[in-house]
Amino acid sequence: PRTIHQIQSGQVIVDLCSVVKELVENSVDAGATSIEVRFKNQGLDTIEVQDNGFGISPENYETLALKHYTSKLSTYSDLSTLQTFGFRGEALSSLCALSKFWVTTCLASDAPKGSKLEFATSGKLQSTSVIASQKGTTVSVEGLFHNLPVRRRELERNIKREWNRVIGVLNKYACILTGVKFSVSQQPTKGKKVVLFSTKGNNTTRDNIVNVFGAKTVTVLVPLDLQLELEPTSAPSQLRSAQEDRDAKEILVRGHVSRPAHGDGRQTPDRQMFFVNGRPCALPQFAKVFNEVYKSYNSSQSPFIFADIQLDTHMYDVNVSPDKRTIMLHDQTRMLDNLREALVRLFEAQDY
Ligand code: ADP
Ligand code: MG
């Protein structure tokens, strides 16, 4: 059974990036306004995420890292209107199976006394001890994949590429999370801890982008605030179901994009960020439309793109892959056509 648990865990936590993503999303789900991500040796030694969220109640300590334990989903119908990032209860149980893993946590009412929780590979709670702590939770992961030698060697071999992906995904969270102080640090095996970037709990994504990418990047951006109207289905209204009426809602594309005259040089994926309702995700077809329209104005450069597609939760599925990275948008072709037209209108209205 333990082997099976490890194999399955390897599907949720496939790489360094998924560890980071799961832990940050748990902190967001916990209502944190401050999230600190700390790496030692680029995560090969430890990955630690500290937040000031609501913490974990003692009655949940035992079940916390057991498979399919989640405090976020009360009924199955919640899945379609999900507001939290997490809902499967697989991340912590997987991390137990794949690393040395511990948690310190503290409820507001218990501060300055918190608990340190240590878990066995199976996810069973092994020990609880009292420690000094402020409100919030810190999750620590040491020696990721130490018990899957092939996966571990692969991680070490590809650490440079993995690290770039990790930074890319952290940039996205830092920029999209308004009202959250977000900081990322790395400490080499021999050497001092370095803060790589941090935001200040800004109220706008624009200010976050300044903190993460520098003031120079934003001066050449135009605000994106596009409305993509999806026409109601061709059936006369009295024949349409309530579901279809909901589906006829508008879609907003909000964020920032380079002015046509001030592109970004070479196209780099880390400077083209897409979100669906605030969830970072890869939307290659959307990226393609942005780049194509942009190219018709400036063929020598690529745009910086920060775009949050805001739409009704009934218009997409996130529940398609274990790591939740894939999002299926319904009626995507029509969305993309409308996006193309809206972008042309936006760029036409600029003095480039
Ligand atoms: P999920 O996020 O899908 O519920 P996880 O395995 O990621 O599953 O986490 C399991 C549970 O642990 C969560 O439902 C939540 O109750 C608790 N938890 C995890 N991280 C935190 C955190 N940073 N703050 C508060 N509770 C947390
Ligand atoms: Mg989670």
Image: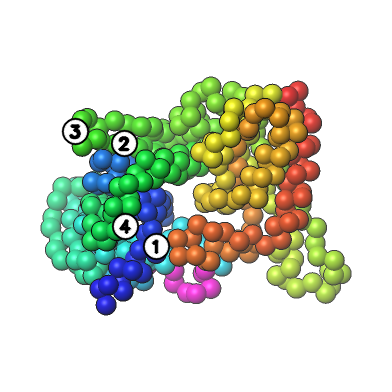
Vertical position of residue 46 compared to residue 267: above or below: below
Magenta segment main secondary structure: loop
Task: Estimate how packed mark 4 is, as few (under 14), some (14 to 19) or many (20 or more) residues with alpha carbons within 10 Å.
Answer: some
Q: Position of residue 350 (x, y in %)?
A: 75, 27
- Report if residue 72 lies within the magenta region: yes
Quote the CA–CA distance across marks 1 and 3: 31 Å
Tell me which label, 2 or 1, sits earlier in the chain.
1
Q: Bounds of the magenta span? A: 70-79
> Which of pointers 1 and 3 indicates the residue nearer the eye?
3
Under mark 2, the amino acid is Ser
- Report if residue 231 lies within the magenta region: no
In terms of depth relative to the viewer, which is nearer, 250 or 15? 15
Name the residue at 65% across, 48% down. Answer: 286
Can residue 261 be seen here? The reply is: yes
Dot 4 corresponds to which residue?
Answer: 151
Task: Estimate how packed mark 3 is, as few (under 14), some (14 to 19) or many (20 or more) residues with alpha carbons within 10 Å.
Answer: few
Q: Position of residue 271 (x, y in %)?
A: 54, 36
Dot 3 corresponds to which residue?
Answer: 190
